[in-house]
Image (cartoon, helix red, strand yellow):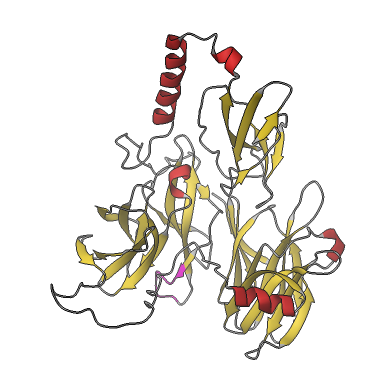
Amino acid sequence: MRDVADTGWVKAIIVTCPHCGARLKVDGTLLDLRCEYCGTSSRIQKRSRVLERVLPPPPERPDAPREIAVQRRTWILPVTLASLMTVPAVVGILVASRARSQTAVPTPGSGTTVTPYKRPAPGEKPSSWLGTDSAILVDLTGDGVLDIIGRARRSNPDAVTIVAIDGATGKRRWESESLGDYSDVYVHPLALAGDQLVFASSRGEVRAFSSADGEARWTTKLDERVKWFCDGGDSVIAVGADDVERRIQRADGARRGPAEAEPPSGAKPASRGKPVPCTRLPADKVDHGWTMKDRELARSHELDFDRLYVGPSGRVLSGSRRKGTRVPMLVAIDDANKQRWRIEVPIDPLAAEERAPGQVVVGADTVCAAYQLTGDKRQMSATCFVAADGTRRWHELLTSHYASALLISGDALLVSMGGVLESRDLKTGAVRWRFEE
């Protein structure tokens, strides 16, 4: 919020990044915006003085125009001007604003109709990889190659779907019906539970789809939004925003009561310590939680801490150099928290953005990272190192300015970017296939 003394009013502007959804502070006079979180360049759509909402555009493609950031303005008029307005005029503005906010974006469970997703007809452009999330790796055919399940998006109408991609060829296996529009879907969990996928919308609606062909199985409604899903054997445990665990029968979506039974009436509850967290199901969103001990450990290694990554080859601290230029850094540590190796991620350290690597993945014998270059294009680069000693294997420029995830699948590195999923050879960095649309 910015206080404008010479006009006598206060102007509040919120701009939402169309790629990652981050809320950004901007000067009301700006025409262009670059997201400080994901680096997305976008054009600010000027708004009227009535509260409105604009659907986010599809993910960026090389042949597509630049994206439009969502901007909302709230105007508080000076008392001298407001006093000149008649009561009917004020009421009319409020009613119009309310009507616009209610009808702007239909969402599942809201009482309005969402146009169902239709598979593209011959010659029609299909959906593209969403690229704001990670992915779920699972062998769908038993051929020993992990396939990829994630989210895709198409426009006209705006619809996000679940898509399965062949891990060997990058070809689309199947695509589900619509989960909803981007604004209702992108922050909510999608997880793999046995032979089915479960998704929870912002309205507390949980839907299940077959992992074999993407066909819808069942739908159930909860009284709270879901943060993540856990394994409950023959049921799925939905952990709500209130931290309450709700069991859902995997077979038909029926509710099974609380995840933990209450003691009989009058019985003394058993003495117990801190609750043990449930085991989370594989999901396309990764929780990079950290503790103060992790941060203190990074400081002891002269690192401005970002995250601690754990994989088959051990633990790797990600951050930036504390002294001087904040070069993206990786520090591998052993079980005693001693440094095994330390590496500057960029080949040209002073040509990189002064921040931690955007994404890191730790494999059995390889550690890979993505970081952003400086300059107008702010292009992303990917690089991999030998996990044993930090020797650099390869370094390549990526086709996007934003990478949402790196995953290791067998001998391949999967790079999730805005509108593109890319498979590269883990040892050489050579592109094997790209899934765009």
Residue 47 or residue 211, whichever sits in front:
47
Q: Is residue 384 left or right of residue 178?
A: right
Residue 9: horizontal and vertical position, in percent? 64, 24
Q: Residue at x 70, y 20 (%)?
A: 7
Question: Which quadrant of the structure image shows residue 212?
Answer: bottom left
Res 346 quadrant in image: bottom right
Q: Looking at the picture, does residue 25 appear above or below residue 99?
A: below
Quarter of the picture containing the N terminus is: top right
Q: Is residue 244 magenta?
A: no
Q: Nearer the viewer, residue 281 or 171?
A: 281
The answer to whether residue 380 is visible is yes
Residue depicted at 44% across the width and 55% down the height:
163
Please provide the residue range marked out in magenta.
137-143
Most common secondary structure along the magenta stretch: loop
Q: Is residue 212 visible?
A: no
- For this view, does 98 lie left or right of residue 81? left
Residue at the image position 67 percent from the left and 44 percent from the top: 62
Left or right: 218 as drawn, with respect to 291: left
219 above or below 332?
A: above
Quarter of the image holding residue 49?
A: top right
**Residue 392 place in picture, x, y as percent:** 77, 77
The percent coordinates of residue 384 (x first, y second) are 71, 73
Nearer to the camera, 377 or 329: 329
Q: Is residue 92 left or right of residue 419?
A: left
